[in-house]
Amino acid sequence: QVQLVESGGGLVQAGDSLRLSCAASGRTFSNSPVGWFRQILGKEREFVAGISWSGGNTYYTDSVKGRFTASRDNAKNEVYLQMNALRPEDTAVYYCAAANIIGAMNLNIMANPENYAYWGQGTQVTVSS
């Protein structure tokens, strides 16, 4: 069992930056790819970014490419999402999730919520214009 806790959300202005953290406890998730998703009330959860277990590969949805960066520190059992140049449309609850993917990964696999076994409770990010 893995417990995930997100932190780092908040209220910022357009153009500002935030760094989200995802801390894992319980069983280590250093062997798990991790994804970041976001959800607006009333809408489906949307894939934002993902990172392979080693950190060597990252995946992003088009709307955040060049602005968001996923990274991880397996020694600390933590994953991060650096978000720069934030826009009002980035406003959402952000979730991290640990995947149970075995084998080759690609963007489509990382973006599928069904491939994730553990989810955090989410952290609110609000970007004002």
Image (cartoon, rainbow, N blue to C red):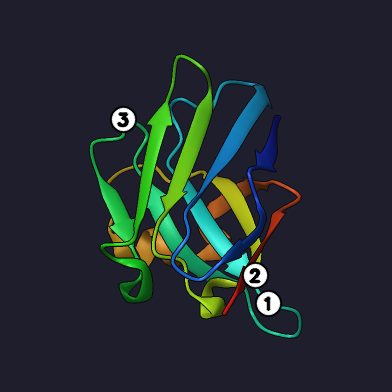
Q: Could you tell me how many numbered marks the image carries? A: 3
Amino acid under label 1? Ile
Q: Is residue 109 left or right of residue 17?
A: left
Q: Earlier in the sequence, mark 2 or mark 3?
A: 3
Separation of marks 2 and 3 at Cα, in angstroms: 27 Å
Examine the rendered structure and indicate whether residue 62 appears above or below residue 70: below
Mark 1: give few (<14), some (14-19) or many (20+) Cα within 10 Å: some
Q: Earlier in the sequence, mark 2 or mark 1?
A: 1
Separation of marks 1 and 3 at Cα, in angstroms: 30 Å
The quadrant the N terminus occupies is top right
In the image, which disc is placed on residue 40?
A: 1
Q: Is residue 83 visible?
A: yes
Separation of marks 2 and 1 at Cα, in angstroms: 5 Å
Q: Which residue is mark 2?
A: 92
Given this view, does label 1 or label 3 mark the residue nearer the observer?
1
Which quadrant of the structure image shows residue 4?
Answer: top right
Q: Is residue 30 left or right of residue 108?
A: right
Amino acid under label 3? Ser
Q: Earlier in the sequence, mark 1 or mark 3?
A: 1
What residue sits 64% from the left and 70% below the top?
92
What residue sits 62% from the left and 47% below the top?
117
Q: Is residue 57 left or right of residue 80?
A: left
Residue 90 in percent (x, y) is at 53, 72
Q: Which residue is mark 3?
A: 54
- The local secondary structure at tag 2 comes to strand
Front-most of residues 1 and 49? 49
Q: Is residue 105 visible?
A: no
Q: Are marks 2 and 1 in contact (CB under 8 Å)?
A: yes
Front-most of residues 96 and 90? 90
Residue 64 in percent (x, y) is at 36, 68
Q: Are marks 2 and 3 in contact (CB under 8 Å)?
A: no
Mark 3: give few (<14), some (14-19) or many (20+) Cα within 10 Å: some
